Image (cartoon, rainbow, N blue to C red):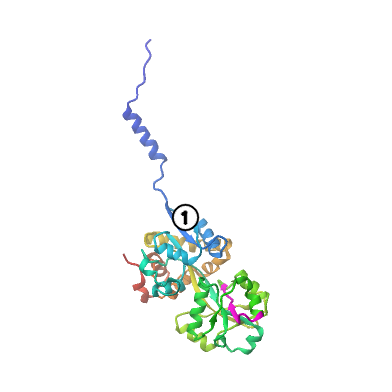
Amino acid sequence: MAKRSSFVTPVALGAAALLTSLATAPVHADRDLAWATSATGSGGHAVKVDLMALLNREWEGYSITVLPTAGAIATVRGYALGEFDGYYGADVAFQELADDSGRFEGFRSAMEREPVQSFWAYTMEVGLAVSADDQEAFDGWGDLSGKPVFTGPAPWDVRAQLERAMAAANVTHEYTEIDIDIAGSSLNEGTIRGFNAYTTGESSLAPWVNEAMLSSRATILNPSEDERRMIEEAGMEVVAIDPDVYDSDVNVDTAYAVPFFYGFHLGPDVPEEDLYEMLTIIDEHSEELREANASFAQVDDDMVDLQRRGVAASGGSVPVHPGLARFLKDNDAWDDAWDDWIYED
């Protein structure tokens, strides 16, 4: 009996291979986002890593890589020059960028694209610590006029915000830069008469600030009532900080500080619908984020209001991502006066 031969044409083989590849290939590849933040070991880097873990799991169509840089300003510059897809930026930096001043003086002419605000993550609140003796003798921030004050390292956003608030209150101090590790001893020795005692999320101190407070007789010097009014008239908020936030006795019933807003932002190349989805994911998983990192406490307490306050604080210095605008509108938190701030092609 003759053997029956089996013959498969090249066309049939090709069709089978095509069907196999279609069955195993993904519907679409994730878009990679290079999202810059501050240096490894910093608070901003830790927060972004925790946010990335959530979004890489829940946000379909995107794959995020965190890129550490020298600091927040470096990320804003890098985004504007087309080096990153996302960045870490504060409203105080946006004001300088819009004015082509301060740390961004002369930079606008080199920009390839305008930064856009899309997600506000938390606030930092700047205030002043002085010696206990000076606190008893001083009536407000104005008593530091003409005196050496360390408002923070020159490139830092906390320094820019405190300088902005002090200028609004007509305080003409002498900026004195020192190493953050010797802030407490410098206050004790009289090298400086005050330093920036800033908080994060109205609930925690930077380690160096806490150490400086504990190693000196530092107390909080509140702006006077008139100074608080002038700061608010300049477009900034003044918030009350519970003195229990500090590990030392700050000798006030309420500490007054001036907040600014930090966010992790993407540009308009991420479509409105996708950005809106990202914000919704963050809102729905805010408790998980808070458990991972206490810096997300404000997101968990009131995600919508935090976004509203961040947009208001920016004053339109950079455009608002359409996805963020839609998120606020859908939650009845959008101000129609901001309509001209929404990014348009």
Work out which residue is located at the far top of the displayed protein and give it.
1
Residue 177 visible here? yes
Would you place residue 186 above or below residue 10 in this image?
A: below
Q: Amino acid at mark 1?
A: Ile
Image position, residue 37 (x, y; %): 49, 62
Query: Which of 90 and 106 lies nearest the eye of the viewer?
Result: 106
Q: Quadrant of residue 128?
A: bottom right
**In the rendered structure, does residue 192 fall within the stretch colored magenta?**
yes
Q: Quadrant of residue 243?
A: bottom right
Would you place residue 51 above or below residue 243 in this image?
A: above
Q: Quadrant of residue 271?
A: bottom left
- Image quadrant holding the N terminus, namely top left
Residue 316 visible here? no
Image position, residue 277 (x, y; %): 42, 60
The magenta region covers 189-199
Q: Look at 58% across and 65% down and name the residue there.
A: 294
- Image quadrant holding the C terminus, namely bottom left
* Residue indicated by mark 1: 64
Image position, residue 196 (x, y; %): 57, 77
**In the rendered structure, does residue 69 fall within the stretch colored magenta?**
no
